[in-house]
Amino acid sequence: MIESILKYKETTIGKVPVDWEVKKISDGTNYIDYRGKTPQKTDKGILLLTARNIKFGFIDYDTSSEYISSEDYSTVMSRGLPKIGDVLFTTEAPMGNVAQIDRVDIALAQRVIKFRAKSEIITNDYLKYYLLSDRFQKLLNEKSTGGTAKGIKGSTLHKMELIVPPIPEQQKIAEILSTWEKAIQETGTIIKSLEKRNRALAFSLFQKQNWNSKQLKELFVRITEKNIENNKSVTTISAKRGFIKQEDFFNKTVASEVLTNYYLINKGDFCYNKSYSKGYDWGVVKRLNNFEKAVVTTLYICFRLIAKKQNSDFWELYFSSGILDRGLSKIAHEGGRAHGLLNVTSGDFFSLKVAVPSLEEQNKIAEILTTANKELHQYRQKLDNLKTQKKGLMQQLLTGKVRTM
C-alpha cells in the first residue's frame, strides 16, 4: 500500500526521506565506457547497438541495423560483456537516453555507457527509472557541455548523485513503475497494429479502377490570399499533428514581425507542406480543422475545394493516405532533371491526377475510415494518459514524496 511520508532530511540534491541515502553513481554501480576506435562494420554478423538504438526507456532495434563480425566481437567488447538487465546510457547524440539490455547477442558502440548495479546497494531496475527521472535528467542537463548537441563526460557522470532507498523499497518502486511501462508497451503495440490496419484499409478503399480520373485543378483552386490584416496566428504543418501554432512546434516564433506577405487561409482549407520528415518523404497535405483562420508560409501550396458534390472529409482522408506519393515522386524525378521535391511547383501539384468516386461512395468511405481512425485516436489518448500517469508516479515515488512501504 502506498502511503504518505512526513520525515525528510536535507542533502546535496534536496530533501529525501530520512531512511534514504545519497551516493555517487560510481559507488552504486560498475560501469564500462565503450568509447574508443570505431569498429569495422559488416553487412551481417553481431548486432551493434548504437546511441540511435537507445531510446528513452527502451531499445529500438529498428532504428539502426549495424553489424560487426563475430571475429571482432571479443575485441570490441573486451571491456565487458553485456548481461540481461544491465543499464545502458547514451552520453551524446542523444544524451541521457536510458534502457535495459534484454538480449546478450549484441555489441555496444561508442557514446554508450553500460552500468551494472552493485546488488548490495541498488537494483538495475530501480537504477533505470532513477536515471530516467525528471530530477536526474535536470541535473544531467545542468552538468552537460556543448551547444545544440549536448554531451556529458564520463568522469562527470560517474560523480553524479543517486538517491538510494532501501533495497525492498527500490524493488517495490520498480514493480509499480514496470506495471505502467508494460501497459504503455502493450498500448503502443495495439496502436502500431491499428495504424497498419488503417493504412491497408485506406489503400484498398481508394484503389478503385472504375472511378473517374481528374486533375486536382478540376476539384480545387489555389489560395494565394495574402495576410493583409497582419493576423498573428502563424501555424506550421506537422506530419503527425497537422496545423499547430508555430511557437508550439519550434518552442519559439520564427516568423517575422510583419506577416502581410504570408498566406491567410480559412477553416476547411488544405495546404501541402513539401518539407519531409521521417516516414513522410514526399511531404504531407493537411486540412485546417482547429482554427477559424491561420497564417502560413508562402512555401506551402494552399488550396480549397470548389467542385460540386464532393465530401471534404473524404479528401482529407485521401490526402492523408499517401496515395499522392507516387505522383509526387514521378514529378520530382521527371526526366532526370534536377527537380527535387522542394522544387515541385503549384502547376506540378495541381496537374496530379486523382480517382474521383461518386459523392455517395465518398460518404461511405469517409464514414468507414473515420470510424477506424476514431478507434486509433482513442488508443493514442490512452497511451498519452498512461505516460502522464507514469511520469506523475515517478515524480512521487523516486523523490520519496510517496512511500511504498
Image (tube, rainbow, N blue to C red):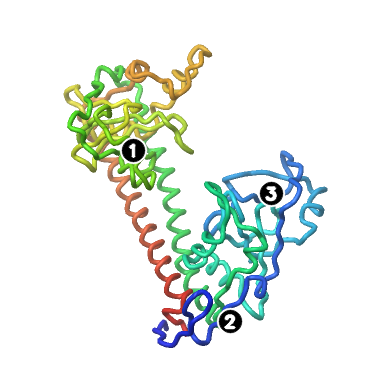
Is any atom of residue 276 visible in this view? yes
Q: Residues within 10 Å of mark 1 (few under 14, many from 20)?
A: many
Taking the image as drawn, is residue 365 in sight? no
Look at mark 2 in the image and give the residue it sits on. Answer: 167
Q: Is residue 230 left or right of residue 86?
A: left
Q: Earlier in the sequence, mark 3 or mark 2?
A: 3
Q: Residue 403's x, y, as percent?
A: 44, 82
Residue drawn at x 21%, y 33% is 230
Q: Earlier in the sequence, mark 1 or mark 3?
A: 3
The alpha-carbon separation of the residues under discs 3 and 2 comes to 33 Å
Label 3 sits on residue? 48
Residue located at (28% from left, 42% from top): 370
- Quarter of the view holding residue 359: top left
| The N terminus - image quarter | bottom left
Q: Given the image, on which type of amino acid does mark 3 rest? A: Leu
Quarter of the view holding residue 360: top left
Q: Nearer the viewer, residue 186 or 107?
A: 107
Label 2: which secondary element: helix
Identified by mark 1, the residue type is Thr
How far is the residue under mark 1 from the one under mark 3?
37 Å
Name which residue lies at 48% across and 38% down.
278
Location of residue 194 in the rendering, given as x and y in whole percent from the top left corner: 40, 47
Toward the front, the furthest residue is 257
Identify the amino acid type marked 2.
Answer: Ile
Residue lying at 44% horizontally and 18% vertically, measured from the top left: 331
> Looking at the image, how many numbered discs can be counted on the residues?
3
Which residue carries the number 1 mark? 236
